Amino acid sequence: MAGRLKGKVAIITGAGQGIGEAIAEAFVREAAVVVVADRNEVSGRHVAERLQCSFIKTDVTDQLDIDHVVGETIGQFGHVDILVNNAGANVFHVPHEMPRSAWARCMALDLEACWAMAEAVLPDMRRRGSGAIINIASTHGFQVIPHTFPYPVAKHGLIGLTRSLGVEYAAEGIRVNAISPGYIDTEIARDYWAGFDDPVAERRKAEALHPPQRIGRPEEVAMTAVFLASDEAPFINGENIVIDGGRSCVYHQ
């Protein structure tokens, strides 16, 4: 059923690769008008050209860039229906060994930027009385793995932000939801495995943790984003949908 997002305008941050790219591709396939917002001009433009959609260079930790991407999108297309806060980075440390700069970077990118982007699109959404904001959180947002500090702190906060905004603006026709992926086959995951002596063995170890004996694919996250952004989910609000193949259901891992 194509065209599930026909006529809707979406800004997707961090859409130059991985999950963000997959979401952009799925949105275009469902007839949305997509703005790829990424700070990497090379990969961002490549995705936008491949999908025949717009690219606006955006550093989501820079308020001027945030104002620019939202303003340009409204200027070109008239409004913003959907915001996908996907840009982020793994920042993993042992707490007492972590430089304070790593904390600041993690909070700025993985939490504060999501609020700043939402804050920028809310006036238009409130004026029109409709909108969908989707925050890409993580299973780290409700579980903690040692030596991954402060990433789980930021992702716990992002789920809290999702619920708070969802409650705050529901009566104005704005829905705010989160998606929490587990292990997904992206560049970030592959770069992580590459840091081990045997990346193939490390990947297999990760796959074995999951009931399906594999990790997720970016397009599996993307189709959930399509559903949440569409008119098929009008009463889903303040929720966090977990996409991890059931790994978080397993008692011992």
Image (spheres, rainbow, N blue to C red):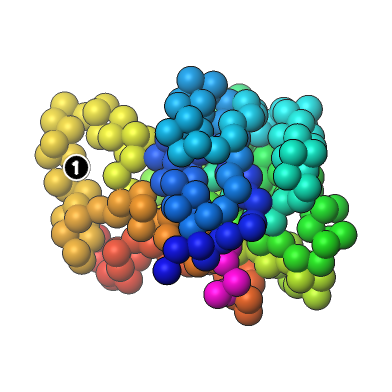
Vertical comparison of 189 with 206: above or below: above
Q: Residue at x 20, y 55 (%)?
A: 214
Which residue is labeled 1 in the image?
203
User: For this view, does 130 lie left or right of residue 20?
Assistant: right
| Residue at 59 percent of width and 31 percent of height | 55
Could you tell me residue 216's position as x and y percent?
29, 54
Residue extending furthest toward the bottom: 235
Q: State the extent of the magenta-drawn residues as a range.
A: 229-233
Q: Main secondary structure of the magenta part?
A: loop
Residue 196 lies left or right of residue 16; in this view the side is left
**Residue 4 lies within the magenta run:** no
Q: Residue drawn 65% across and 51% down?
A: 9
Which one is in front, 123 or 135?
123
Is residue 159 shown above or below 238?
A: above
Give the x, y percent position of residue 221. 41, 56
Categorize mark 1 by other alpha carbons within 10 Å: few (<14), some (14-19), many (20+).
many
